[in-house]
Amino acid sequence: MPKSKRNKIVSLSKTKKKGREHKESIVNAIREAAESYNSIYVFSFENMRNLKLKEFREQLKSTSRFFLGSNKVMQVALGRSASDEIRPGLYKVSKLLRGDAGLFLTNMPRDEVESLFNKFEETDFARTGSIATEKVELLEGPLDQFTHEMEPFLRKQGLPVRLNKGKIFVASVFRTTYVYMKVEFTY
């Protein structure tokens, strides 16, 4: 009787891990930028879309540099303690890198940077499960934007709707601050 072959771990992922060289190149890029720019800012973000950030980066490309990535790698680049920091006081900045955060390096004055970041807010379509920033209120009456096939789906979502002569009507006033719609498409 032949012995069974030893179990081998097979990776199903086609992507390769980013090795030490990649992380070292990021650390070196952050250190070079820290030497060439006067100011370093830590910014945090919520529900960020890549396209919107790309537009913002293009707007500030000539005067500044953005870094997003692993917080630990960025902390190593700036220095985690006073003994391994690259410029005096930068280890304090590395302690601010928590959660969804990034680095913004620039020579622009502080008030200009603050005004740029404060006024940069883009609206985009909501994604599934996101909390509404506005109260949603549907008054009694017809919902002309939906076809009659959508009535069971809307009812399943908790909307008080009824079908009348092929049109969907809201039966009573519906108010919510949480919008959750899960739509599945089949091809």
Image: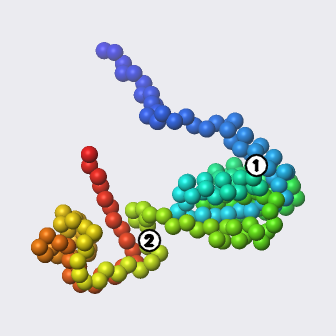
* In the image: residue 13, left or right of residue 82: left
What type is the residue that disc 2 sits on?
Ile
User: Can residue 40 be spotted in the picture?
Assistant: yes
Evaluate if marks 2 and 1 touch, with contact meaning CB atoms under 8 Å apart: no
Can residue 152 be seen here?
no
Residue type at the position of mark 1: Ile
The image position of residue 24, as x and y in percent, is 73, 40
- Mark pair 2, 1: CA separation: 35 Å
> Residue at 55% across / 54% down in the picture?
51
Percent coordinates x, y for residue 131 in the rendering? 44, 71
Residue holding disc 2: 131
Q: Residue furthest top?
A: 1
Identified at 45% across, 30% down, the residue is 10
Disc on the earlier residue, 2 or 1: 1
The quadrant in which the C terminus is found is top left
Image mark for residue 110 = none
In this rendering, the answer to whether 184 lies above or below 168 is above
In the image, 121 versus 8, the foreground residue is: 121
Kindly identify which residue carries mark 1: 30
SS at mark 1?
helix
Indicate whether 78 appears above or below 116: above
Q: Is residue 88 left or right of residue 28?
A: right
Q: Taking 125 as reference, is 111 above or below it? A: below
Q: Is the N terminus in the top left, top right, bottom left or bottom right quadrant?
A: top left
Residue at (29%, 83%) from the top-left corner? 139
In terms of secondary structure, where does tag 2 sit? strand
